[in-house]
Each structure stands twice: as C-alpha cells, then as structure tokens.
Amino acid sequence: SLSKKLTFLVPLKERREFTLRFFRYLVKVNFPYKIFFADGSKKRLSENYMKILKNSKIDFTYRKFPYDSNFAKFQRKILNSLSLINTKYVFTFSDDDFPLFDSIDKHVKFLEKNKSYVACGGYAINFDMLDKPFDKDETFGHPINFKKIMTKYSNDKKNKISRFEYYLNNMENSVHYVFRKDILLRNYKLIYAKKIFFTNKSFYGFLRDGANSISGKVKKLNLLTFLHQYHFQSNIKSFLKHEQMVEKNSFIKDFKKFYNRISKTFFKTKKKKLKHIMFSNEFFFPKTKINSVLKKTKTKNFLISKLSKIKIILLFYSYFLNIKMHLQNEHIKKFMVSINDKNIKRELSFIFKFLKTNQL
C-alpha cells in the first residue's frame, strides 16, 4: 500500500505540550504511515509520552539526538535521520501541525506515476487559536483566522539553473513536500559535506531549498495538505523578518557563503549566469530601501495605552467570545464552505472536533 512507502520525519525540540497533543491525535486517527521522531531537546522524551504510541498500532521510531543548540546541529540531525529512514518517500513535518491523509496519498501517487519529479506538495492553511481568558495554553480551543499559505506554482523547469532561478524569485520553502528519500538525503549530504555556519539561520533554509530545487522538478498540486497553527512558540518567530535580515551587517558575508556553496556544489559551468541570477535577485538585494521601523500613529498608541488600563474588560470579552465560539465557530463555518472535497472536509471536521474537546 502507499502508506508503507512513506515516512513522516518529525523533528522535536521542547514544546512538549504540542508533542503530547500530536501523539494523541496520531492515535485518534490511527495514523497510517511510518513516522520517525528526531528529538533534539535537552532531555529525552518521558516514558509516559512514549506509552501513548507504544499502546497503539502506529509504526514509529524515536531517536534522541544531541541538543539542537544551533541551527547547524539541527540540520545535521535531519541528515542523520534521513540516513536511518528506509522508505521510498519522506515527508518532513511539524508536531504542531495537522496532516490531511487524502491529499498526502495523492502526492505519493503522483510521484509513483511521474518519475521525473523529485517532490510533490500542496498548499496549507494557517490558523490561530482564540485566546482564552484565564489560560495561556494554545494546544486546544477554537481555531480562527484561516489563511491560505504555500501558494506558489510547480517548479518544473527543464534545467537546474532555471529551477534555481525560479526558486529565488518565489522563495517558497520545500520542507512540507513529499520527497523521494534518496534525493533528499543526497541533497543534504552534498550541501553539508563541509561544515558551514551562517550568522542568520534563514540561510540554512535558503541553502536547503535551493539544493532541492536544483535536484529536480517539484510538483505543486492544488490540494490542501495540512493545517499549520501559528502560536507563541512557533519556530518562525525566531527568524528575522526580511527587512531585518538584509539590513544586518552579517548579511553580505552570509550571502557570499550561500553563493559559494551553491556554486561549488552544483554548478561546474554557467557560473557567470549563476552569479548574475543571485546577485541581481531582488529578494536579497531590493532596489528600494526597506524601512524596517514600523510607524506607530498617535491614535494607535493612545488606544494601546487605554486598553492596557482596562484588562478586566478584555478578559470578560474574551470569556464571552469563547462561549460564543463553543456554540458556533463562524470562522470554521466560513472556511468549511470553501472546501469542496468530501474526504478533506471529513478530516477537517475531525481535527476541529479534536481541538475543541481534547483538553490536555
């Protein structure tokens, strides 16, 4: 079956409440694929957590790696994990997200039928969790603010320099794609054959995604593939914003390292064209200066000042909203109207029910 050909690679690092939620969700849905947990936390996962999976029929592997003290060690963890996975395909995933199996099966089917593609993915939906008045936990509650993300098109250019140029012009990460495992492992081995250190950790992602685009054609299907929760512990919050990144003194040094690794690893020829493509790219070298200072109006400052003095009113308002959402979540209702696929709709309904009732 298709499910036996795919392994979910799930990096772990602290955030145990989300890991616990994820484990319980996997059991609830009888997770059909193999799953490999690569833990880079300070301490090993407790046996109480492991029992949740051990008492199920889920085909899982848990491996404790050295602490992810920096992003270079994190990437090394991924490389080592890939070398331990023995399925044909691999899907890197986060323990705070929710996969949609019907779409993932279709990605695997596409790769089975189209040997010239190295990866296949879809789009995602981002959501927030409604703040609760007396509880900061974000692992359960009422999902709101649904927004479509990962909306770029297929990168199926015929040659590697054209695919790399497409990537630079679109800058969509390649993490949440179903990859041919051997291709992804080879890419990691190539880019980390020699140690490399970036001051700005975004460049580790640029290097990974650039290598993946160079390695072969990537298909984007118009399928909702997973739900992504944005929360206070989201990894993305630790990255610099684009305008901050390009204004950093270390930016040019990091960019040159990125350029040199791509050039020496993948391009024996066409180096002049590669240099032009990279050093004229507007994402890295915007033609107009970016103003990284957010302008704050007097009106906004006045409102913030006033609101900070009436927190008790906001707490009661939050309490009222949670009661209202419990009766009917208009955000979910509106979002579900936009979904036509019955299988996806059924999976989404289960996720929302789980988030509403599975208080940890």
Image (cartoon, grey):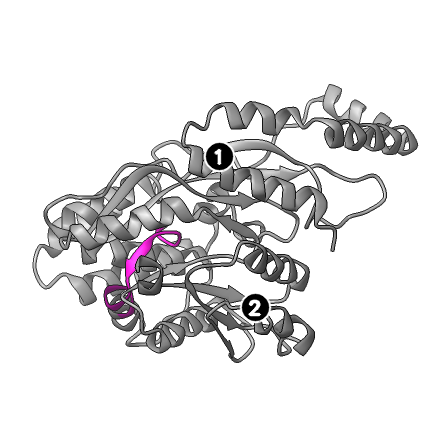
The one of 345 and 310 positioned closer to us in this rendering = 345
Circles 2 and 1, Cβ within 8 Å, touching? The answer is no
What amino acid type is highlighted by mark number 2? Ser
The one of 87 and 182 positioned closer to us in this rendering = 87
- Position of 260 with respect to 91 (left or right) is left
- Residue found at x 34% / y 64%: 4
| Residue 221 seen by the camera | yes
> In the orientation shown, which residue stands out farthest toward the left?
269
- Residue found at x 57% / y 45%: 229
Horizontal and vertical percent position of residue 134: 85, 44
Query: Magenta residues, as a range?
Result: 174-185
The answer to which quarter of the image holds residue 132 is top right
The answer to which quarter of the image holds residue 305 is top right
Q: Magenta span has 59?
A: no
Nearer the N terminus, badge 2 or badge 1? 2
The residue carrying mark 1 is: 345
| Distance of label 2 from label 1 (alpha carbons) | 25 Å
- Position of 299 with respect to 154 (left or right) is right
- All told, the count of numbered labels is 2
Q: Magenta span has 179?
A: yes
Above or below, 253 against 191 in this view is above
Near mark 1 (Cα within 10 A), the count class, few <14, some 14-19 or many ≥20, is: some
Above or below, 251 against 7 in this view is above
What amino acid type is highlighted by mark number 1? Lys
Q: Secondary structure at mark 1?
A: helix
Which mark is drawn over residue 154?
A: none
Which mark is drawn over residue 56?
A: 2
- Position of 95 with respect to 298 (left or right) is left
| Residue 290 seen by the camera | no
